[in-house]
Image (tube, helix red, strand yellow):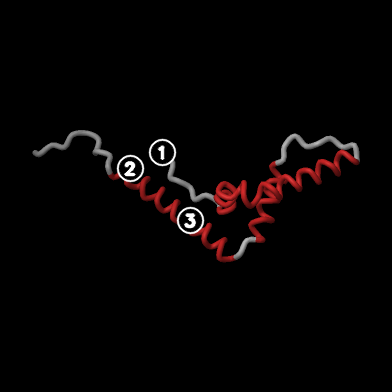
Amino acid sequence: VPKPRKPRVLHAYSKRHWKARILPHYQAALERRNAALSAENKPLPTSNIHLKQKIIQERWNLETPEFQAEVQKEVDVRYEQAIESYNQAFTDIPKAGKEYDW
């Protein structure tokens, strides 16, 4: 069982605040980009992941330092809890084999 990895703060931010803080800006950027490509008769991309990442980063950079610290603290606490659960899972495993008293 692999050890839990600490999630990136941007992933936690986007997961928790996607609808309220990011989605409206993403949709507007998507519409602008699609309109510009259509005007130039260029095909639309099949994936929008780069645009999503760009908008998430832009929105994160506009957040206050206090808000960023709050999200970072939340990530840290969840990671510590995951590590604690991981470590606890291995302390509860009985030792393999029999123990003999000679």
Q: Which mark is residue 74?
A: 3
Residue under label 2: 89
Q: Nearer the viewer, residue 15 or 94?
A: 15
Point 72% across, 37% down: residue: 47
Q: Which mark is residue 1?
A: 1
Q: Which numbered disc flags the more N-terminal residue, 1 or 2?
A: 1
Q: Nearer the viewer, residue 14 or 88?
A: 14
User: Quadrant location of residue 100?
Assistant: top left
The answer to whether the residues at label 1 and label 2 have Cβ atoms under 8 Å apart is yes
Please, what is the three-letter code of the amino acid marked with disc 3? Answer: Glu
Residue at the limit of the structure toward the left, as seen here? 102
Circle 1 residues within 10 Å: few <14, some 14–19, many ≥20: few
Circle 2 residues within 10 Å: few <14, some 14–19, many ≥20: few
Q: Going by the image, does 55 lie left or right of 97?
A: right
User: Quadrant location of residue 45?
Assistant: top right
Image quarter (top left, top right, bottom left or bottom right) of the N terminus: top left
Please, what is the three-letter code of the amino acid marked with disc 1? Answer: Val
